[in-house]
Amino acid sequence: MAKDPAREKLRQAIAARKAKIARRDQLEAAQTRATAAIRDADIKITQAQREIGEAREGRAKAAVDAMVAGGDHVAVMPSITRQRAAITEIEDAKLIAERALEKIRDELEDIEQSLIYKMAIDEGMAEVLAPHVVRLIERTDEIERMQIQNRAELNLFSRFAPESHQHRLAVARGLQYRTTPLPTPDLAPWKKLIADLENNADAPLPKI
């Protein structure tokens, strides 16, 4: 059985959207990890800076104590050097995470825009629905024309009704207009079809 080109186009658009949703989920997870890494880096930098401050205070106190005791100067410089190196390393890692986060957010924004407007989905649905919607409208118009024609023909017969029945006929017509809806196609299945086609290119068509 030959494939319907319109259905196939819609099927590809739905698959592309599903892939974008999966990619969005991956990016959101990566965004969470990058944000956590940046937060963790800030904590480590603050801790290292505090340790440098404490080391400097310790160095100054040790120097004073040494002077008072007449001993040699006490050096704690290696500790400070290590902390500064650690801060530089952490800052480099933080910068990498920030750049990655910026790219993630840009890509997420593009994906969200495409998911909101879903132009390919709408175009695919239009191609699937177009011939059937035209037929549906034609059928509705046909029913209305038939009813108008039938009413006109009945009016021709009404002249044969005796004068005494004209009032009864007028009342009957009025009641019919108020209580009898046009037998137009039920649109509820078509509304459901539109919703279904957004996720299923093979959703069955209602009967017209």
Image (cartoon, rainbow, N blue to C red):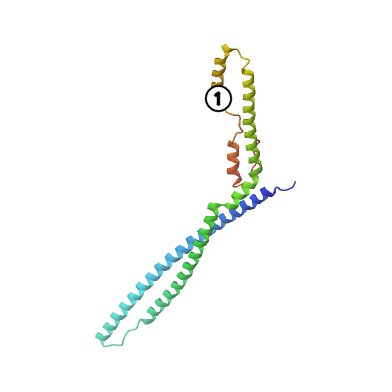
Q: Which residue is mark 1?
A: 177
Horizontal and vertical percent for residue 205? 65, 40
Residue furthest out toward the right: 1
x 43%, y 72%: residue: 91
Which one is in front, 203 or 149?
149
Which one is in front, 141 or 32?
141
Specify whether 180 is left or right of 67: right
x 56%, y 21%: residue: 173
Specify whether 197 is left or right of 74: right
Q: How many marks?
A: 1
Horizontal and vertical percent for residue 31? 49, 61
x 61%, y 18%: residue: 158
Which one is in front, 72 or 103?
103
Vertical placement of residue 100 versus 177, above or below: below
x 45%, y 69%: residue: 94
Q: Residues within 10 Å of mark 1 (few under 14, many from 20)?
A: few
Horizontal and vertical percent for residue 174? 54, 21
Vertical placement of residue 182 versus 83, above or below: above
Horizontal and vertical percent for residue 78? 39, 81
User: From the image, which quarter does the C terminus lie in?
Assistant: top right
Q: Secondary structure at mark 1?
A: helix
- Amino acid type for the residue under numbered disc 1: Tyr
Vertical placement of residue 144 versus 171, above or below: below
Vertical placement of residue 159 versus 208, above or below: above
